[in-house]
């Protein structure tokens, strides 16, 4: 892997899109202070924060989280499935018949 020398700049993705938002003066001051504490520009701070939030949100929505009781109920249903009620069996058979040409 090639190492960067101190004179080389990191390649960043081309930024061709624009995002605009109206914020209060208090929000801007807060964001600026946080960016300064991290040694970043306001733009880099906002883009980085929004990116992290988007990735986290997408990951959270892809994951199912269960309580301990829900986990036990799920495991029990998988390990000891119940017989489907007669009405459900009849509906499934009717559905299968409708699929056949």
Image (cartoon, rainbow, N blue to C red):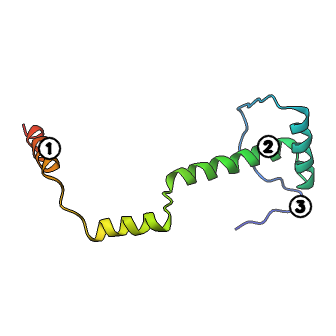
| Snapshot quadrant of residue 97 | top left
Along the horizontal axis of the image, is 76 left or right of 92? right
81 relative to 16 in the view: left or right: left
Residue 6: numbered disc: 3
Label 3 packing within 10 angstroms: few (<14), some (14-19), many (20+): few
Depth check, mark 3 against mark 1: the one in front is 1
**Marks 3/2: CA–CA distance:** 26 Å
Which mark, by number, is residue 83? none
Chain-order first, disc 2 or disc 1: 2
Q: Nearer the viewer, residue 44 or 3?
A: 44
Q: Residue at left 75%, top 48%?
A: 49
Q: Nearer the viewer, mark 3 or mark 2?
A: 2
Residue 18 at x, y = what percent?
73, 30
Badge number at residue 91: 1
Q: Position of residue 54 (x, y in %)?
A: 64, 46
Give the total number of marks visible in the rendering: 3
Q: Which residue is mark 2?
A: 46
Place residue 26 in its image quadrant: top right
Depth check, front residue: 59 or 80? 80
- Mark 1 falls on what kind of element? helix
Q: Residue at x 81, y 62 (%)?
A: 4
Sort mark 1 into few (<14), some (14-19) or many (20+) by Cα contacts within 10 Å.
few
Indicate the secondary structure of the residue bearing disc 2: helix
Q: Residue at x 48, y 57 (%)?
A: 64
Viewer-nearest of labels 2 and 1? Answer: 1
């Amino acid at each position: 892997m090639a190492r960067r020398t101190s004179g080389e700049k990191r390649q960043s993705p081309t930024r061709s899109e624009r995002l605009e938002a109206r914020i209060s003066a208090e929000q801007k001051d807060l964001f600026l202070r946080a960016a300064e504490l991290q040694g970043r520009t306001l733009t880099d701070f906002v883009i980085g924060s929004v990116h992290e939030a988007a990735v986290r949100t997408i990951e959270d929505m892809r994951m199912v989280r269960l309580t301990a009781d829900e986990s036990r109920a799920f495991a029990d249903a998988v390990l000891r499935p119940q017989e489907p009620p007669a009405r459900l069996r009849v509906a499934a058979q009717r559905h299968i018949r409708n699929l056949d040409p």
